[in-house]
Structure formats: C-alpha cells, structure tokens
Image (spheres, coloured by chain):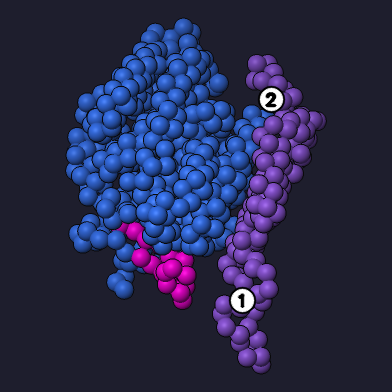
Chain colours: A purple, B blue
Amino acid sequence: MLPVIKDHLEEVAALILFSIGFSNLLLNRNMIKKIIGFSMMDSAIYLFLASYGYIAGRLAPIMESDVPAPSVTQYVNPLPAGLVLTGIVVSVSTSAIMLALTVRLYRRYHTLDIDKIALLVKEADEA
Amino acid sequence: MKWWQNIPFFLVWVPLLCASLTAVLPCKASQALILLFPALGTVLSGVLYLHVSGNMAFYTFPMGLFGAPFGNELRYGTVEAIMAGTFCLVLFLSLLGGWKRLQEHIAPERKKLYCVMVMLLLSSMMAEVFTNDMFTAYVFIEITTIAACALIVARTRGRTLFAATQYMIFNMLGSGLYLLGISVLYCMTGHLLMVPMHEKIEAMMASGEHLQSLTLSVTLMTIGLGIKSALYPFHRWLPDAYEKCTPSSSAMLSSLISKTYLFLYIKILVRVVGLQHMNALDLRPVLVLCAFGSILMGSIDALLEKKMRRMIADSSVAQIGYIYLGIAVGTEAGIAAALFHIIAHALAKSLLFLSGDRLIGASDEDADFHELCGAGFRAPFSGAAFTVGALSITGIPLLAGFASKLYLSQACLTMPSRWAFAGLIVLAISTALTASYFLITVITIYRTPVHAYHAPVHHPWYSTAALLILAGLLVVVGVCGSSLYTSILSGIPYLI
C-alpha cells in the first residue's frame, strides 16, 4: 500500500484536499468557509491534472525559434496545463459570484451562518 | 462545407457576442435582442433539422485549425437539431409569456443585466447541446450556472437571495464532481473529445483494464449532473429556486436549464460510455433507484405543498425522475422516450409556471391554494391554459404527457422483469399522485371564491399568444407524438 501512495503522492494529496473541500462546502455553515471549501475542491482537481501532465525529466512545451527543437517526446503534455488555466478562470468567476451573494446576504441578515439565514428567511415569509 | 453546416457555430457564438452587445445597447434594443435571437434560433434549428434529417448522418464542425483528436469541435445530427429548436422555442415563449411580469419584477437598472444573462444562457445551452468536447461542456455548464443564479436573484427579495445561494452551493458541488469525473476519464483515455474517448473506453472494456476507475469517473459525473438537474436525493434546492423568481425565470430554470444538463448526461452515456457498457459499470440499479425516488418523493412533496408555485416546482422533481428512468432502461428506445419526455415536460412546465403566475396575479400574491378559488373565472384564459398543462403532466390522452408516459412504459418493458414490473408500478402510483395534486388545483381554481378580489391584471396579447402556442404545441406533440418519437429514435444512431 505504502509504495503505491509514494508513487502517487500528488494524486493522494489531491484526493484528500478534494474530500476536505467537498465536505466543507457541503457541511460548513459559514458562507466564507464554504467558499474556501469550494476553492480547495477545485484546486485539488487542478493539482490532480497538473500532476498528470508533468513527466519528470521532460522539458516545458515551449519552442524557441533560434534553438533546434528537440523531439516531441522530450516535452511534457501541455494540455493539462491549459485545462488548469481555463479551470482557474471558471473557478474564480464562480467564487466571485458566491462572494457577491454572501455580501448581499450579510447586508440583509447580518450573519454569515446559512442556517440562521434560512431561519430568518422563514420568519420573514411567515410575517 | 455548406452554409447550413455553420448553424451550430452561429447558435453558440452569436448569442455570446450579443451578450456583450446587450451590455452597451439601450435597454429597449437589448430586450428586443433577447426576444429576436431565440426566435431566430428556432428557425435556424428548424432549417438544420430539415437538412440533417434528410441526409440521416452526423456532421462535425472543427473549432480552429486542428481536427480530432487534438482540436475542439461541435457535432450534430437530428437529435441535436430537435433539442436546440425546442430549447430556443421554449426560451422565446417563456420570455414572451412572462414579459409583463418581467418588466414589473426586475428593477430598471437590472434589466440590461438580465438581458446579458439570458443571452449567456442561450449560448451555453446551445454549446452543451452541440459540443463534442467534455471540457468545453464543463466550461459552459459553469456559464449556465452563473446565468441561472443571476436569473433567480434578478427579482430582489430576501427569499430569492437565499434561493440563489442555495442553488449556487449545490451547483458548485455538482460542478466539482463533474470536473473530477472528466479529469479521471481524461487521465485514463488521454482524450477530451467524446468519440476518441469512447474508442479508448471500448478498448478498456475489451481488455478489462481500469474498470474500477471508469466506474468511479462515470459515477462522479452521474452524481455531479444529478445534483445539477435536481435528481432525488439531491433536489432540496429546487423548490426555493423556482418559487420566488419572476415567472419567465422559473419557466427557463425548470424547462431549459435542468433539461440541458440531462441532455448532456444522455450524450455522455450514449457517445462516451456506450449504452452497452451501462450494465458492466453497474449504472442501471443506481439510476433506476434514484429515478424511483425522484418520481415518488417529488409527487408526494407536490401533494403536500400549500402554495401553487412550490407545487409546480416539486412536480419537476418527479418529471426529472421519469427522464432518468428512460435513461436507466439503457436502450435506444429508452433514450428516445427520455428525450421525448424532456420536450413534453419543457413545454408543459413553461405553460404551468406562466399561467399559474397569472392565476396567482388574479388572486393574492403568495396565496395558499384556498385563495385561488375562482381564479379560473377571474382569468379564464389562464385557467384554461393551466388546465391543459396540468392534464398533459398528468398524462391525459391527446396531450404530450400521455405520449411520453406511453413511450416510457413501453421502454420499461424491455428491462429485466423485476425492474420492468417495479417501473410500471411506480409510473402508475406517480400518475395517480400527479392527477391528485393537479386535479385538486384545477378544481380549486374553478370553485366559488371565498371573498371578493381586485380586478385581474391585464396581460398584453403577445403574452397570451405565447400561452396559446405552448398549449397548442402540447396538443400537437400529443397527437403527432409518433412522428416526433420516430424522428428522435432514428437520430439516436447518429448521436453515438
């Protein structure tokens, strides 16, 4: 078991981070901590993709015009890095929307606790 | 390449450009644009359908210089053309039918932002329908989520803010799981395009390698898209999100957004995983049980609701269960029945949300059921439209809901006997429950009112025409259902 973990250290770390982020987003009552959980969850996936794209001993996939290009097998796969960059943009947009909603909720209900907000919303509906 | 082969690209990218344009155009022009483009999209999808159904083939549109398996591409056939046309048409009618309420509910300074979000929604839906790339689908899923959140929160009330937050939390969980699923699948296959991915999966299934990882990845995507489409037991966010926003937004959320995720899931199962491998991955029992849970719990929740909008929203959970049941059958007939139900439900649910809101408008806002007594007399046209929608969802013959339930039942019979038997029993129970809560509502709106009400709100003729078209389409799809079903069924081989 241990050698498998040692060989796939990044993947194991990504899995643990994803689980922490997922449970935080699902279970934590504080809105800010939920957003941190979401960022952690997405970062874990980017770590997973980046570790898949990296191959020890290979070059960054950047070709220079004045240097003779090595064989394509000497480069790492550039696609996971592209996916991670796109994913980060998407993740930042979603986090921004969530933060904006949190600010609006806080201004209206003066708390970041989602359960308390739910109670206040219910009370306002019944009033 | 012929001119009509550019239509999918046009349907994805022009709304995206128009979304930027609506931010700088005057408000009236922006509002005209959000009505014009879905109408144009419907016509163009019709043209696309005529061309692709005549040739009975699928087409690809390379996005950039590189072709498959390296580049990104759109892929389309009969099924994609039908779904794109349906989504554009329902979007157009949802906006038109709730236009007056939209103007009342959305603050003037937010109207342009609402237009931007509608265009983004249209673009992302079209991208999810046409894309052949798993990661592109993820990006547009997130755009759909952001647009949907803005559509909910556009009507400023405490409840909409809370509903939008809940919606975002659940959708972020779903997106995370979907992204992890495609990341695992990408690591196993080395591809993001659906067809090359499928070829690798075929090789894996033949050799028996990485089966557990494949099951894990498909399960993650199933749960992710299940959360986003409000499949039981992940449906708790739905009633709040659909209840308090403006009727056009409710109709779009219920009829279009959850259905786009379902169509994407169908594409993943059919084109990437392959229907023949569903049993090997133990997907069927999970999907069938979730579908049964959705159908029964959605119906029971709707029966127990005291407010009309929440009842219509809860009924969506049951209808989503029907669609998953069709998917779980795992045959072309099952998938065709599920797609048919997506169309039938999209039409009926828009009609119910729009006409239901008019009935509430003719009574007291936020009214319980008993306050709706006589609403059918105060707003006769809306009462009739609501009755048509309710009868269709219940499954009364000559309406779209009956045809879809018939095809679903026929598809269920092809499952192993215990599942087929259980499926038919659940369908029967659910039909009885649906009839109970919708018939109670229809009877209530035609009962003698308990007290005098203010004069009913006058709605413009074009909103009434939108309701009439939706009700007419339910009848047309119900009567000519076999032609549509045959067309979908004949297009499924080209979805693969």
Rendered location of residue B302, percent (x, y): 46, 20
On whether residue B203 falls in the magenta region, the answer is: no
What are the residue bounds of the magenta stretch? Answer: B60-77
The structure residue drawn at horizontal position 66% and vertical position 92%, both measured from the top left corner, is A66
Comparing B109 with B407, the one in front is: B407
Q: Which mark's residue is nearer the viewer, 2 or 1? A: 1
Q: Quadrant of the N terminus of chain B?
A: bottom left
Rendered location of residue B203, percent (x, y): 39, 58
Q: Judge left or right: residue B421 versus residue B437.
A: left
Dot 2 crowding, Cα within 10 Å, few <14, some 14–19, many 20+: some
For badge 1, the amino acid type reads: Tyr
Q: Which residue is mark 1?
A: A75
Q: Quadrant of residue A37?
A: top right
Q: Secondary structure at mark 2?
A: helix
The structure residue drawn at horizontal position 68% and vertical position 16%, both measured from the top left corner, is A127
Q: Quadrant of residue A81?
A: bottom right
Q: Tell which circle, 2 or 1, labels the residue nearer the N-terminal end.
A: 1
Q: Is residue B434 above or below residue B6?
A: above
On whether residue B63 falls in the magenta region, the answer is: yes
Q: Which residue is mark 2?
A: A118
Name the residue furthest bottom. Answer: A66
Comparing B332 with B468, the one in front is: B332
